[in-house]
Image (tube, helix red, strand yellow):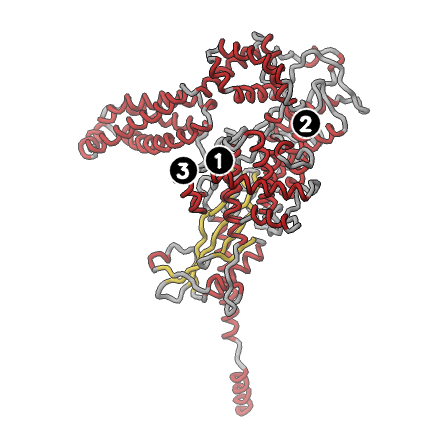
Amino acid sequence: MSFGVSIGDILKLLEIATRVYKNCRDCPGEYKTLTNEARNLTNLLEDISDKYDAIPASKRQQLVDVYGTCVELLQELDKILIHYNGLDSKSKRAWDRLKWDEQRSRALREKLTSSVVMLNTFYTSLIHDNQVLILEALGRLERDYRGGHREESLVSVGKIVSGVAQEENEDEDDAAWPQIIRDLEDVGVSSRDVEDYRDFIVDWFVRAVNEGRLMEERDEPQSLATFPQGLSIALPVPSNERVQGMPSYETPRFPPPAPELRPLPSPTSNFPDLRSASPSLDSPTTQADPKALTAVQTPQTASISNPIQSSIDENGSSTEGNLIWTAQQIVAAWEERDFVAAETLLEKQLAAVEGGGTINTGQPDRRVLLHLIGVCASYSGNFLKAKHLFQRAFNGIYLSGGNIDDGDIAAARWLGDTCLHLNEPHNTAFAWGVALEGLTARYGTSRDLTWRVYEELDLLNRLLQSITTVAHSFRRNFDPTDIFLSSHAKEKSSLMISVLSRMDKIASNISTPDHMHALAKGINTTAELQSPRPRTDSNFAETYLVEPLVSSRAWPLQWDATFSPGDAILLQRNMSFQLPRNPMVPPNLSFVEYTPTVGLVHAKNLHYITKRDIKWLAETVQAGLREMGIEYRCGIGATLICRLNQRSDNFAFFEGIGIKFRKVQFRSLYGLKVTPVLWATRGVPTQGNGFLSLKARKGTEGFRDIIKGFLERAEDEEKIAESQLKTKPSWKSSKSLKLSSEKGT
């Protein structure tokens, strides 16, 4: 469960627990004694599912541990009870007499009781957690605000949010804060807890206002015909006919095509998923042409208060209506994970904003639109474009910590990830260094976000020496990066020196022996960073696309929750690693100079075996990889490391797969074995629950079949050539045949 536990996982476990409880309750045999424990476990899982959205990040790991224990036990019980209850009465009596084991029954009961105790402990700590209580209270306040019951409080909320946005007006902020305290006291939160969690509460209000969740609910109009004449063009009425050039996100996607092999000349090309030989729902899909879709989704009708006349362009259409309509299509495309269509629509929205487009609440934030376009480009695999866009989303040319806001931090983190996909670790080190400086200046080193960026930078420097290399290059008046070119070289140099100093300071503050020992172990401490980053809200509200950003604290998609920094760094390290070469051995064969052996028993696990020598096998595999356009490097232990550009559910990423060469012991046989996926730069979010849980497929059956396929073809060609050589008469035999024929005549 390194990828976390989603609400879908909890609901699935609740379904199994409910079935186990009912089967225990209706069971006539000895399993009926487990009914009480099964019922308690079911009730606790139901309570946890109700409060899942309020679980703080600090308690997610505890939930993962409890979940892992429960799922194994419930799956075992479910299998036993389904089989037992499916028997007839006579068979059940025989089962009870022959199969029932008192010791096993006691062990099952103890496991079930232990799971109940762990779940109860977790739930008890959850319902008494101050942050959870405050979050639930804020939810009740949100309903009051939307119902129009606390109109006087909205003024205070507006003052606090505007103060955060302008980062000034502290006196006005302090004057409005008592009203928020009184509101939270009304819903059961003490004033002391409100003061202790002030930053958390303010951040919640900023995001709620930015997403429009505190606006008073109004009745939806029956039809657009009831609007005043002045609004008849503000929200265009979509027809059931096809609109030229407008994609539909209502119709289901076309079935994915079967995988094809295409060369991979660059990281931006779309390489198919080689792990699966047959098409499935998880197979790579092609992006659908928006013009090929035949239906248009009807957008939700927005409720408008205090209508004013919208600006009208030359064609008589409403700029405001166009912005709202495009924003609705962007959100729909994003929810469908059609990132190419979302990117196109976002570019259209950006062009309208840069052309002066606006609505009555103001103009959308251009930097947010640039950032979201870059996110779509990164997800779809156009990393070069994403690299350019994240730099454009950066605010200004100054890189000191005080000049970096939350939007800059988000852009710098995404930029570093993108550069790592492009095999540019020096750029990654610099971009992540900018993010570390910004986080430290704004939030300090004790925040989880700051610590996470520090750990990623530390791993990057330990395995690739990227930060040290960049810092030393600046000291020699050489800039090894090609990002932030508008910033002065002296400022970039000062930033890297500051990053190195700050990292040393953070490391020196780690006083626990266990952590120091873990840092000393180096690569063995990357288990946490090999999993994707902490989950974040994967969706963004429509208001981000049509209204000004209230505060940079509410910046959408502040980091790539699908990215696995540990895997990406390890893949980069293995692809850039060069073995010392023996001058007596050809370069393409030096990695198999000492081929490990396997016994006859383990030889059956090899995926391909040949009687030809290791030279032929290694050269044939490398020639096939070059023909397919797959990048590879020679690794330690007679291993080729291959980097594949993959696509799954419209997410583009890289995978690292190994091909190990072996000699069969006591035989003149050589073979190879294709490893499972060793590293994947992204985990693919599961459908239906945002990015709360990710999946990572380790199978490489498709790639293995392709390797076997071109090896078999090469061996067949060799056999044909050898047979032709045997049947062709030699020079001596042909001469003797000619002399004998002359004598005969």
**Residue 149 spot, x, y in % from top left:** 56, 7
Instruction: Say which residue appears at 32% left-offset and 28% top-offset.
Output: 115
| Front: mark 3 or 2 | 3
Residue behind mark 3: 512
Closer to the camera, 426 or 668? 426
SS type, badge 2: loop
Task: Name which of mark 3 and mark 2 comes first in the sequence.
Answer: 2
| Front: mark 3 or 1 | 3
SS type, badge 1: strand
Type of the residue with mark 2? Asp
**Residue 710 against residue 465 in the figure, above or below:** below
Q: CA distance from mark 3 to mark 2?
A: 45 Å
**Residue 19 against residue 744 in the figure, above or below:** above
Task: Name which of mark 3 and mark 1 comes first in the sequence.
Answer: 3
Residue behind mark 2: 365
Q: Is residue 282 visible?
A: no
Instruction: Say which residue appears at 60% left-offset and 12% top-offset.
Output: 175
Residue behind mark 1: 694
Closer to the camera, 367 or 33? 367
Q: Is residue 124 left or right of residue 269?
A: left
**Residue 726 spot, x, y in % from top left:** 49, 75
Type of the residue with mark 3? Thr
**Residue 473 against residue 227 in the figure, above or below:** below
Q: CA distance from mark 1 to mark 2?
A: 30 Å
